[in-house]
Amino acid sequence: MKRNKLSYKVGQFFMFAGPAAVLFALVVVVPFVYGLYLTFTKWDGISPQKPFVGLDNYKATFADSAYWHSLILTIIYSVVSVVLINILAFFLAYLVTSGIKGQNFFRAGFFIPNLIGGIVLGYVWQFVFNRAFVVIGTALTKAENTVPSLLSTPNGALFCLILVSVWQYAGYMMLIYVAGFMGVDQSLKEAALIDGCSKSQAILHVTIPLMRSSFVQCIFLSTTRCFMVYDVNLSLTNGDPFNSSVLAAMHVYNQAFVYKQYGTGQAEALVLFVICAAIGMAQVYFGKKGEVEA
């Protein structure tokens, strides 16, 4: 039959998936390959000449102490943020699936912060930290001098980044956990309660194991988002004070577009991509390995 011919199948593929495949290649594959090529060149982003320098950019990457400092800072920021995001998202999901009055309203309200762009979100929270919290803190402490902003210290700036990221992403992860809660068979929880389990024991030993796929998805998404964060870092702290809150993505951007060292910037971006991909794949592998089914 005609439908069994390879030409027919290829034609069907290009008819339905062809446009998406072409767009994916133009937007993702071609820029990735071109960026990989730039890691072996010395280019300032303006000159038509791109001298080949071999592995010099990778040597510069491993010798760049500022890059590794930003990467360590990113790891700290990501670990704390991912833990807090998923804890908060889980409890919000439990709250809005427990049958409370107006739970659909609360779902929409908790999700709204994720709809706000990172740049706008950063500037809004910058005003809150620099103005609102300063005024409130000064009034509560009755200090003669103005209480300093959290953004004025390195640890405070990192804390602010974590707080804003948790506030932004928790609502999105909450929806995935809501789907996980709704996917657990009620009869299993009822059977656990009949067998003598308390509600907390039923959640711990029945609900959570059956929601493992939700945990895998949420941890993967929150990890990759935190590792690659740039917009909030730019608008909230801009790396201040004294470049102490520059995360890895911002350092890569500055290296390429501010300092005009595109080759080194691309090499650092590739290293960041490999680290992020390795962490994400390991997390998904070990998470999926222990999944259980009802």
Image: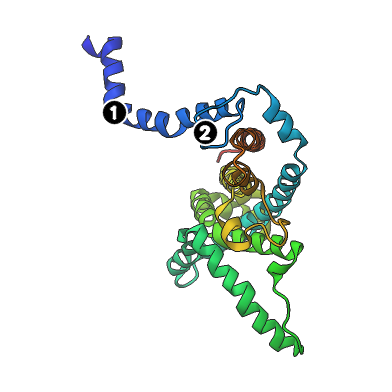
The answer to whether one can see residue 158 in this image is yes
* Residue name at image x 37 percent, y 32 percent: 23
Q: Which mark is residue 47?
A: 2
Quarter of the picture holding the C terminus: top right
CA–CA distance between discs 2 and 1? 41 Å
- Residue 111 placement, left or right of 242: left
Q: Single out the residue that lies furthest toward the left.
A: 2
Q: Position of residue 29 (x, y in %)?
A: 47, 28
Mark 1 = which residue?
16
Judge by depth and name the residue closer to the eye, 154 or 10.
154
Within the image, what quadrant is residue 26 found in? Answer: top left
Q: Is residue 132 above or below residue 142?
A: above
* Residue name at image x 29 percent, y 28 percent: 16
Mark 1, residues whose alpha carbon is within 10 Å: few (<14), some, or many (≥20)?
Answer: few
Residue type of the residue flagged with mark 2:
Ser
Q: In terms of secondary structure, where does tag 2 sit?
A: loop
